């Protein structure tokens, strides 16, 4: 019988810059009795990774450039925020009043370069603070995975998740922005279906599917459950980057 279980790790503490995130994870898992087993996957919300890595930015310290001021007029956004978005981006994909969608420097397309204010402590009304995505989510995932394996003696997978909107669909959904321990793209081409037909084009974005499933427990508001343990997938171990999920420009018909 196939079975997949997802368990939100309870009582995870508020993360602040400089925290040893792997140590916090290990402590939370030990306290909850959720000892990872080989093949388990830990989904970790981007926000706690960014907080530990001090990816905060205060808007009152940002000086917007000419492009940021021009884009801010078109999007009706704070020019200081737009400046941060442009610094984190390769290019602008779409913009209109209230909307700025960019191609992030890591390759994926998302609103506001993933920069967010939700669940970010504000020191004062004058010092509005936002949170950027991790500088290198794959590296963050690898480092956490290594610490978990050293402590628990089990090779696990790690997915760092974020929430993105999607073209042609309403609502946000969990997506993977960093991965370690397994291939984020599951290539099933050449496999046979039940009728003997050989699959020609089937590649599964398994890291995104894991992120979306974990998002059901993580939530989007004040749930306070940024860590989810998944058991039952038994994916083969691999060392592949999250960029495997980025559609090549030549194949991106909507670019």
Image (cartoon, rainbow, N blue to C red):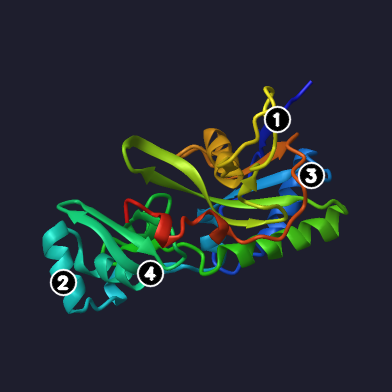
First in sequence: mark 1 or mark 3? 1
Question: In terms of secondary structure, where does tag 2 sit?
Answer: helix
First in sequence: mark 2 or mark 1? 1
**Residue 134: image x %, image y %?**
51, 64
On the image, numbered disc 2 is attached to which residue? Answer: 69
**Residue 43: image x %, image y %?**
63, 46
On the image, numbered disc 1 is attached to which residue? Answer: 5
Question: In terms of secondary structure, where does tag 4 sit?
Answer: loop
Q: From mark 3 to mark 4, how far is it between C-alphas?
A: 34 Å
Question: In terms of secondary structure, where does tag 3 sit?
Answer: loop
**Label 1 close to label 3 by CB (< 8 Å):** no
Relative horizontal placement of residue 56, taking residue 204 as reference (left or right): left
Q: Which quarter of the rendered picture does the C terminus lie within?
A: bottom left
What's the mark number on residue 88? 4
**Residue 239: image x %, image y %?**
71, 60
Q: From mark 2 to mark 1, how far is it between C-alphas?
A: 48 Å
| Residue density around tag 3, few if under 14, some if 14–19, many if 20 or more, within 10 Å | many
**Label 3 close to label 4 by CB (< 8 Å):** no
| Residue density around tag 1, few if under 14, some if 14–19, many if 20 or more, within 10 Å | few
Which residue corresponds to the image point at 56% horizontal and 53% vertical from the top-left? Answer: 14
**Nearer the viewer's eye, disc 1 or disc 3?**
3
| Residue density around tag 4, few if under 14, some if 14–19, many if 20 or more, within 10 Å | many
Q: From mark 2 to mark 3, how far is it between C-alphas?
A: 48 Å
On the image, numbered disc 3 is attached to which residue? Answer: 39
Which residue corresponds to the image point at 39% horizontal and 40% vertical from the top-left? Answer: 172
First in sequence: mark 2 or mark 3? 3
């Amino acid at each position: 019988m196939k079975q997949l279980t997802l368990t939100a790790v309870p009582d995870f503490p508020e993360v602040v810059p400089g925290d040893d995130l792997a140590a916090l994870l290990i402590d939370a898992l030990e306290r909850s009795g959720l000892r990872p087993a080989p093949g388990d996957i830990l989904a970790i919300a981007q926000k706690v990774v960014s907080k530990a890595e001090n990816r905060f930015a205060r808007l009152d310290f940002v000086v917007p450039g000419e492009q940021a001021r021009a884009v801010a007029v078109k999007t009706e956004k704070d020019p200081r925020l737009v400046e941060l978005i442009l610094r984190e981006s390769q290019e602008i994909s779409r913009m209109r009043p209230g909307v700025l969608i960019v191609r992030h420097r890591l390759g994926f397309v998302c609103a506001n370069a993933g920069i967010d204010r939700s669940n970010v402590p504000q020191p004062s009304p004058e010092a509005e603070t936002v949170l950027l995505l991790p500088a290198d989510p794959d590296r963050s995932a690898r480092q956490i995975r290594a610490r978990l394996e050293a402590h628990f003696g089990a090779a696990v997978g790690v997915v760092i998740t974020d929430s993105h909107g999607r073209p042609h669909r309403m609502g946000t959904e969990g997506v993977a922005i960093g991965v370690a321990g397994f291939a984020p793209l599951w290539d099933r081409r050449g496999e046979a279906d039940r009728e003997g037909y050989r699959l020609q084009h089937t590649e599964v974005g398994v890291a995104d599917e894991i992120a979306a499933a974990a998002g059901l427990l993580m939530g989007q508001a004040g749930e306070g459950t940024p860590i989810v343990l998944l058991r039952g997938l038994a994916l083969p171990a691999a060392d592949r980057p999250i960029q495997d999920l980025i559609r090549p420009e030549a194949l991106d018909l909507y670019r």
